[in-house]
């Protein structure tokens, strides 16, 4: 697996998120997607806002913006399914993973779409 260490940034009221990102090493998105595709029971989750998602996303993912992550129970009924979570750079997905884990989900931050080298789909998933 390819790993990357994120930058350490302190932002008031979000220091915990960035400290967590600094301690944790996360796979690059392409490697995370390989793991996701091996798991027939997993969910790929894009936590960017809807307009960002429509501009380009990994095919087959579910869009649940970080701003609505507490509504996960309405969309993600199976808490046994592993969630592979990405955003633009990896920061929002790290925060989403922390919230989802606190809600009882098994969430894995796979980074940001900026590092993605595969096919990108535009618009909404049908």
Image (spheres, helix red, strand yellow):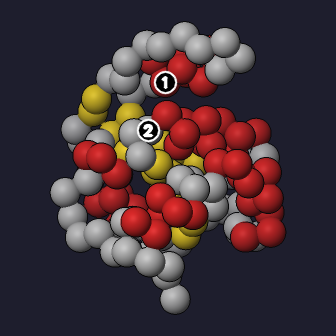
Label 2: how many Cα within 10 Å (few below 14, some 14–19, many 20+): many
Taking the spot 54% from the left edge, 39% from the top edge, the residue there is: 92
Residue with the mark numbered 2: 90
Which residue sits furthest left?
A: 117
Residue 110 visible in the current orientation? no
Q: CA distance from mark 2 to mark 1?
A: 9 Å
Taking the spot 60% from the left edge, 42% from the top edge, the residue there is: 97
Residue 13 visible in the current orientation? yes
Q: Is residue 125 above or below residue 54?
A: below
Q: Is residue 36 left or right of residue 72?
A: left
Q: Is residue 57 above or below residue 111?
A: below
Taking the spot 33% from the left edge, 59% from the top edge, the residue there is: 33
Q: Position of residue 89 (x, y in %)?
A: 39, 39
Would you say the residues marked 2 and 1 are in contact, meaning their CB atoms lie under 8 Å apart?
A: yes
Q: Nearer the viewer, residue 4 or 122?
A: 122
Label 1: how many Cα within 10 Å (few below 14, some 14–19, many 20+): many
Q: Nearer the viewer, residue 41 or 72?
A: 72
Q: Which mark is residue 3?
A: none
Taking the spot 71% from the left edge, 17% from the top edge, the residue there is: 13
Judging from the image, what secondary structure is the residue with disc 1 in?
helix
Q: Is residue 25 left or right of residue 3?
A: right
Judging from the image, what secondary structure is the residue with disc 2 in?
loop
- Of the two numbered discs 2 and 1 on the same chain, state the one appearing first in sequence: 1
Q: Is residue 125 left or right of residue 56?
A: right
Residue with the mark numbered 1: 21
Q: Position of residue 109 (x, y in %)?
A: 48, 43
């Amino acid at each position: 697996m390819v790993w990357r260490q994120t930058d350490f940034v302190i932002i008031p009221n979000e220091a915990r998120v960035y400290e967590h990102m600094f301690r944790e090493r996360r796979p690059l998105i392409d490697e995370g997607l390989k793991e996701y595709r091996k798991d027939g029971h997993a969910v790929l989750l894009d936590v960017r806002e809807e307009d960002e998602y429509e501009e380009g996303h990994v095919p087959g993912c579910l869009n649940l913006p970080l701003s609505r992550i507490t509504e996960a129970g309405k969309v993600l009924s199976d808490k046994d399914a592993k969630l592979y979570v990405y955003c633009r750079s990896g920061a929002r997905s790290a925060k989403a993973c922390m919230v989802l884990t606190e809600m009882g989900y098994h969430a894995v931050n796979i980074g940001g779409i900026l590092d993605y080298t595969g096919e990108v789909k535009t618009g909404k998933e049908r």
